[in-house]
C-alpha cells in the first residue's frame, strides 16, 4: 500500500483527489495530513512552521476528504509536521502540542461535516 502524504505532492495539489481515487482504499492504509511548507526545511517563525498542519496552512482538504469518502477509506490518518530542527518538539509544552493537534482535528472534522452534508 501507499502512505499518502500531501506534503510530498505539493506541486500536484489538483491531482491529489484523483490519485486517491485511482489508488482506492485497499491501497491506502495510511494518510499523513501534512501540508508542504518552508518550515519543514529551515528555521522560520513558529507561526510559519505550524502551517504544515491542517487548519494552519492553505491546503484545501475538502477535495481530499471527498475522495477518501468516495473510495471508502477506512485506514489511518495522522496529523503530522516536521519541526525544525528535526527531533525537537513541535511546541514547548505537551499542552500546547495537544491544543495545536486538536485545532487541526477540529478543522478536519468541520470539513468532513461539509463534505458529508
Image (spheres, rainbow, N blue to C red):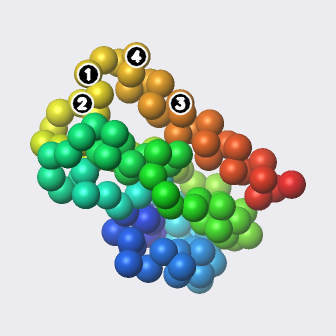
Q: Position of residue 11 (x, y in %)?
A: 38, 78
Location of mark 1 (residue): 92
Relative to residue 19, is residue 47 drawn left or right?
Answer: left
Residue 68 visible from this viewpoint: no
For image coordinates 59% across by 75% down, the residue present is 17
Location of mark 4 (residue): 95
Q: Earlier in the sequence, mark 2 or mark 4?
A: 2
For image coordinates 86% across by 54% down, the residue present is 117
The residue tagged with tag 4: helix, strand or loop?
helix
The residue tagged with tag 3: helix, strand or loop?
helix
- Asked whether disc 2 touches disc 1, contact meaning CB atoms under 8 Å apart, the reply is yes
Name the front one of labels 2 and 1: 1
Q: In the image, is residue 4 above or below residue 43?
A: below
Q: In the image, is residue 42 above or below residue 100?
A: below
Q: Earlier in the sequence, mark 4 or mark 3?
A: 4
The residue tagged with tag 1: helix, strand or loop?
loop
Of residues 44 and 41, the one drawn nearer to the viewer in this rendering = 44
- Asked whether disc 4 touches disc 3, contact meaning CB atoms under 8 Å apart, the reply is no
Image mark for residue 102: 3
Q: Position of residue 10 (x, y in %)?
A: 38, 71
Q: Earlier in the sequence, mark 3 or mark 1?
A: 1
Residue at the outermost right position: 117
Amino acid at each position: 500500500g501507499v502512505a499518502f502524504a500531501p506534503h510530498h505532492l505539493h506541486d500536484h495539489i489538483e491531482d491529489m483527489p484523483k490519485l486517491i481515487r485511482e489508488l482506492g482504499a485497499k491501497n491506502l492504509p495510511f494518510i499523513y495530513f501534512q501540508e508542504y511548507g518552508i518550515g519543514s526545511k529551515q528555521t522560520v517563525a513558529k507561526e510559519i512552521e505550524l502551517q504544515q498542519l491542517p487548519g494552519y496552512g492553505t491546503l484545501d482538504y475538502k477535495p481530499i476528504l471527498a475522495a477518501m469518502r468516495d473510495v471508502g477509506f477506512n485506514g489511518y490518518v495522522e496529523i503530522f509536521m516536521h519541526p525544525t530542527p528535526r527531533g525537537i518538539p513541535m511546541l514547548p509544552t505537551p499542552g500546547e502540542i495537544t491544543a495545536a493537534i486538536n485545532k487541526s482535528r477540529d478543522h478536519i472534522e468541520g470539513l468532513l461535516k461539509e463534505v458529508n452534508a
